[in-house]
Amino acid sequence: MNFLLLLIAFVVLVLINGIKVLREYERGVVFRLGRLTHTAKGPGIVYIWPVIDRMVKVSLRTIPMEVPPQDVISRDNISVKVNAVVYFRVIDANKAVTEVQDYLYAASQLAQTTLRSTLGQFELDQLLSEREEINEKLQEILDKHTGPWGIKVALVEVKNIDLPDEMKRAIARQAEAERERRAKVIHAEGELQASQKLADAATVLGKVPTAIQLRFLQTLVEIAAENNSTTLFPLPIDLFKPFLEKAESKK
């Protein structure tokens, strides 16, 4: 009698042990005698048969995975270190368990190799300036390869591109030379515009000679505003013309 009670208690405990609770973001992939059942279980309360069933829990939440710094040689033969972050989630729990041994490790290794091979197709200037296009290309490649595993890659972001010190100095010199070039071009354009305006002003003053005298007076007013300045007043040669003519007539 005691043995029968113990047996019944053991059976009850085993049957109760088959009750599992899965969270909203979890799914249970069940193998019955080694064979995959058709659909993943969950969420909520699910029951698996003891001994004959084995359940593997899979999270459906988005997983942020950091890709460690990778040595990348750009298309113009410059060595840089690049790291990134990949956001992905499981959309088919059955495939994530049966199609790949460890989908987290597999996704990490695929992201590292894809990062090296893809960024090696770009030149350094493109790596620094075309981040959005590079991120989209990485996301497309990773999503294509992880699709058969039941994984959806939502986003890939290149975080940092670490340049060698000599390249940083070279880029700084290049940027400084570019700024000097732009400054010289702007200065030359300003001189050209100023010369055109001066030519237009000379044309106007040439048509009205008295306007030159008015301009002289305006210049004197502007100079006189400085108390410590020396004022030089240019006398027009027309003022001496009558005296010169009288001196020539006496000869």
Image (spheres, grey):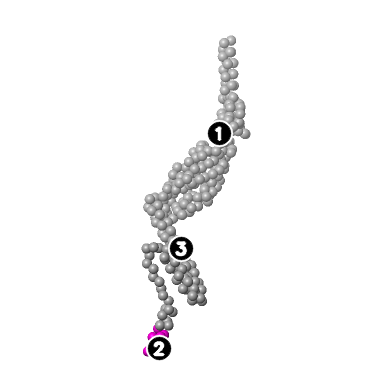
Position of 231 with respect to 209 (left or right) is: left
Identify the residue shown where x is 59% and y is 21%: 15
Q: CA distance from mark 3 to mark 2?
A: 57 Å
Identify the residue shown where x is 40% and y is 83%: 244
116 or 235: nearer the viewer: 235
Q: Which residues are magenta?
A: 244-251
Residue 66 lies in the magenta stretch:
no
Task: Check whether the beta carbons of the residues at disc 1 and disc 3 lie within 8 A of each other.
Answer: no
Q: Which residue is mark 2?
A: 249
Identify the residue shown where x is 47% and y is 71%: 215
Question: x and y percent of residue 192 in the render?
Answer: 47, 68
Q: CA distance from mark 2 to mark 1?
A: 119 Å
Q: Quadrant of residue 32?
A: top right
Residue 8 vertical placement versus 117 (above, below): above
Residue 250 lies in the magenta stretch:
yes
Q: Which residue is mark 3?
A: 186
Which residue appears farthest toward the top when viewing the image? 1
Q: Which residue is mark 1?
A: 58
In the rendered view of the protein, which quadrant contains the N terminus?
Answer: top right
Helix, strand, or loop for circle 3? helix
Foreground: disc 1 or disc 3: 3
Question: x and y percent of residue 153 in the render?
Answer: 55, 43
Q: Main secondary structure of the magenta part?
A: helix
Position of 97 with respect to 166 (left or right) is: right
Q: What amino acid does circle 2 point to? A: Ser
Q: CA distance from mark 1 to mark 3?
A: 62 Å
